Structure formats: C-alpha cells, structure tokens
C-alpha cells in the first residue's frame, strides 16, 4: 500500500474509534472553540465557543444573514459527524453535502440528520477530499473546518476546493499550520520539527505547512479576496479543556473503551498546548472567493 493509502486508512480508523467518545463528551462539533474569555468556566461555554467558531468564520469571510449573501449549496470537506453541516443547513436553509474518510462518521452524521429532520437538506458520504465526487463549480460555499491538516498534498487539496466552488462562491479553510518562516529561514528549527512529528504520529497528519504557504497556493489559482488571520489566542482555552474532560471519570472510562489510537491521541494533547505556547503551531483561518 502507498504511504498516502496508509495515511488515509489511519485517519479513517482514528476517527472510527474516537468519534463516539468525542460526541459523548463534547457533542457533535468536532472542532476548536472560539473564545472571548481566556478562562471559560463551564462545559456549556466550550460548546458555545464551538458555535462561535462557525459564526466568526462566516463573518470573517463576509457571509452575512442577508438573503442575497446566503449560500444555497454547501460542501463540508472533512465533515466529522456533521455538526457544521447541520448548523449551516438550518441557518441558511441550504443544501449541504459532507464528506469524510470515516464510515463510522458518515453513518452517524446521516442518522443525526434524520433525527433532526434534515435528511432532505443534508447528506454524508465516505469520500476523499483530494478526489471529491462532485462536478466542477457545484457549491456556493466550500467549508473545511480543521481537515486541511490531514491532507498529504496541500496543492491538490486546494485545487479540489477551488474546483468544486461555484463562480462567485466562497472558500473557508480553518486549519492547523506551523508558523510562517522568517526571511532568512529555509525550514523550522529541529526541535520544532520534532514536536510536530510527535503530533503527526498520533493524529495521522502528514507534513505541516504555514499559513503563507496556503495563501500562495490560493494566489496561484487566481482566487480573489484572499484573507488570512491567526486565531491561536482565541482557541487557547480549548486543549486544556479537552484534557480536563479526558480525566473526568466518564472521560477516562470512555477513553479506555475507545481503543489504542484514541489513547495515543490523548497522550499527545499536552504537546498541542506546548506547540501553541511556543508559537510553533498556529490556528489559521484563510478565506477567498472564486472569480465570477
């Protein structure tokens, strides 16, 4: 099997094993929260922060509640169990399709959509983000919330996002990056690479790239209104909260039941905090528009 095939299988198995635990403890949004306060106190604050992440991402991209500005067709690339898809479908009355490598996630996402009365608006399938099963120019909004870090070929990934975007449509890419390199740097420092490699091994991530790398890829495709921001400070409370939830009795028992891949992922969570604190890891949002 090719290295890309091994990576894809690892990603699928990791989320097959861990998604039930995450939903049980954190609910149906499998992404960072956006925090107004550096020290939220309640679990409800964290779930509200995850919704705020969606709203802040839309606002950053210039998508408002004005009817003329609302997307009608959306693809959720790396959809998890469909939390963003269902939220966006309800908010905009849009049709949304989600793709994931995890059969467990796709099945659960479709069940939740049916349970919430959204089966006519939202659907999910197993598919590769680098080979999306959609025609060119199908979606007004292409949404990728924390899936880009799993993509082994960033240029191919960005090309696919752009390909399925309708003329005039918007791409929202929220992802983990490493810091931008300085003018005299050719690569990260050895200790930074070592830290990221340990995270990669646990979370089935290929090589990281920087926010500026993504911007250059988008520019190469002649996309417009390219904007980027570093939201690392706004997500700072997230990983400490995840660690605390893992060490509750419920979290600990669920973790033990969820399998070795999930346990391995839990053990490197402190490295994510270290990466943010040392400025190696950046939580980036990048948005752009496809020319009409």
Image (tube, rainbow, N blue to C red):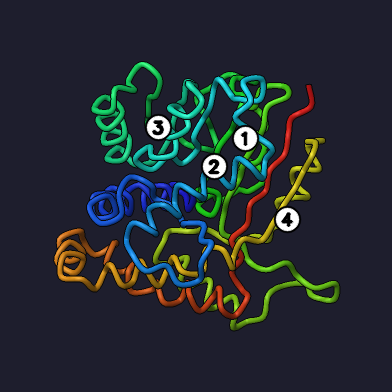
SS at mark 1 in the image: helix
| Residue 79 in picture, x, y percent from top left | 43, 39
The answer to whether mark 2 and mark 4 are in CB contact below 8 A is no
Q: CA distance from mark 3 to mark 4?
A: 31 Å
Task: Kindly identify which residue carries mark 2.
Answer: 144
Q: Earlier in the sequence, mark 2 or mark 4?
A: 2
- Look at 26% across and 24% down and name the residue there: 114
**Mark 3 — residue?**
86
Q: CA distance from mark 3 to mark 1?
A: 20 Å
Find the distance from the CA under tag 2 to the CA under tag 4.
17 Å
Q: Are marks 1 and 2 in contact (CB under 8 Å)?
A: yes
What's the CA distance linking mark 1 and mark 2? 9 Å
Circle 1 packing at 10 Å, graded few (<14), some (14-19), many (20+), is many
Whole-Å distance between the Cαs marked 1 and 4?
16 Å
Closer to the eye: label 1 or 2: 2
- Dot 4 corresponds to which residue? 213
Q: Which residue is mark 1?
A: 161
Q: Secondary structure beneath disc 3?
A: helix
Foreground residue among 60 and 262: 60
């Amino acid at each position: 099997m090719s290295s890309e095939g091994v990576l894809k299988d690892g990603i699928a198995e990791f989320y097959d094993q861990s998604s039930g635990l995450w939903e049980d403890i954190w609910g149906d949004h499998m992404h960072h929260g956006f925090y107004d306060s550096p020290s939220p106190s309640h679990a409800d604050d964290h779930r509200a922060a995850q919704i705020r992440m969606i709203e802040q991402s839309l606002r950053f991209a210039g998508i408002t509640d004005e009817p003329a500005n609302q997307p009608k067709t959306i693809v959720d690339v790396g959809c998890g169990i469909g939390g963003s898809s269902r939220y966006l479908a309800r908010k905009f009355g849009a049709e949304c399709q989600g793709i994931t490598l995890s059969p467990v996630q796709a099945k659960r996402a479709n069940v939740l959509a049916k349970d919430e009365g959204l089966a006519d608006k939202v659907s999910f399938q197993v598919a590769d983000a680098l080979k999306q099963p959609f025609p060119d120019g199908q979606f007004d909004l292409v949404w990728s919330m924390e899936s880009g870090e799993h993509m082994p070929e960033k240029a191919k990934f960005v090309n696919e996002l752009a390909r399925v975007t309708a003329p005039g449509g918007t791409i929202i890419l929220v992802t983990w990056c490493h810091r931008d390199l300085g003018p005299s740097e050719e690569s990260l420092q050895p200790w930074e690479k070592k830290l990221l490699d340990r995270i990669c091994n646990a979370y089935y991530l290929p090589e990281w790239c920087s926010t500026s790398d993504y911007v250059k890829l988008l520019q190469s495709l002649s996309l417009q209104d390219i904007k980027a921001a570093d939201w690392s400070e706004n997500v700072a409370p997230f990983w400490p909260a995840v660690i605390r939830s893992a060490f509750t009795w419920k979290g600990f028992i669920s973790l033990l039941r969820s399998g070795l891949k999930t346990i391995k992922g839990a053990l490197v969570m402190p490295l994510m905090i270290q990466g943010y604190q040392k400025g190696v890891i950046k939580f980036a949002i990048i948005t752009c528009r496809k020319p009409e």
